[in-house]
Image (tube, rainbow, N blue to C red):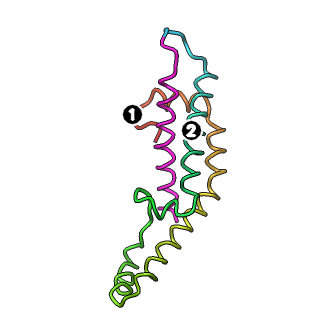
Amino acid sequence: MIKRILVLVVAIQFAGCAELQKVVSQLPTGGGVLTQDQIGNGLRQALDNGIKNQVTKLTSKDGFYRNELVKIMLPQELQAVDKGLRKIGLSNLADEGIKVLNRAAEDAVKTATPIFVNAVKEITFNDAKNILLGEQNAAT
């Protein structure tokens, strides 16, 4: 379960980074100074958009199962069972097991979404500043 949530967090953060890049590219270049509120609001907007866009994809039917970047495979302990089922002609049953696991991840994302949305709403100016001006991977 923790691995699935970690995958979700990483996916959302990458999307948030893309959204943040969009916001940064739209900033005025005339040398004007951004206020603390503008920086915080821009970051919140970028992260919120990233969450909304990625959550919509991940919570849709087969959002995990049909996406090779986030598809959850069986843990090593169950791979022998999977291989055995396939060997005796029960590939459909093995596929269904993986599908059920990924559908559970879809449900977990739906449940976790309010937590991420609330975290974005709680971002302070200092958080925003550290993300915008920090190391290259500060947003992740």
Seen in the picture, residue 44 relative to 105 is either above or below; the reply is above
For the residue pair 13 and 106, the one nearer the viewer reads as: 106
Residue 74, image x, y percentages: 42, 73
Which amino acid lies under the numbered mark 2 shown in the image of this protein? Leu
Q: Which residues are magenta?
A: 1-29
Q: Residues within 10 Å of mark 1 (few under 14, many from 20)?
A: few
User: Quick check: 19 above or below 86?
Assistant: above
Task: From the viewer's perspective, tell me whether residue 55 is left or right of residue 10.
Answer: right
Q: Is residue 117 located in the magenta-colored stretch of the structure?
A: no
Q: Tags 2 and 1 in contact by the CB under 8 Å rule? A: no
Identify the residue at horizontal 49%, vertical 44% (top origin).
Answer: 13
User: Which residue: 51% across, 67% down?
Assistant: 102
Q: Which residue is depicted at the point 62% across and 40% down?
A: 120
What amino acid type should be assigned to the residue bearing mark 1?
Gln
Distance from disc 2 to disc 1, alpha carbons, whole Å, reads 16 Å
Task: Please give the residue where the numbered disc 2 appears in the rendered image.
Answer: 47
Q: Nearer the viewer, residue 20 or 40?
A: 20
Secondary structure found at label 2: helix
Q: Is residue 14 magenta?
A: yes
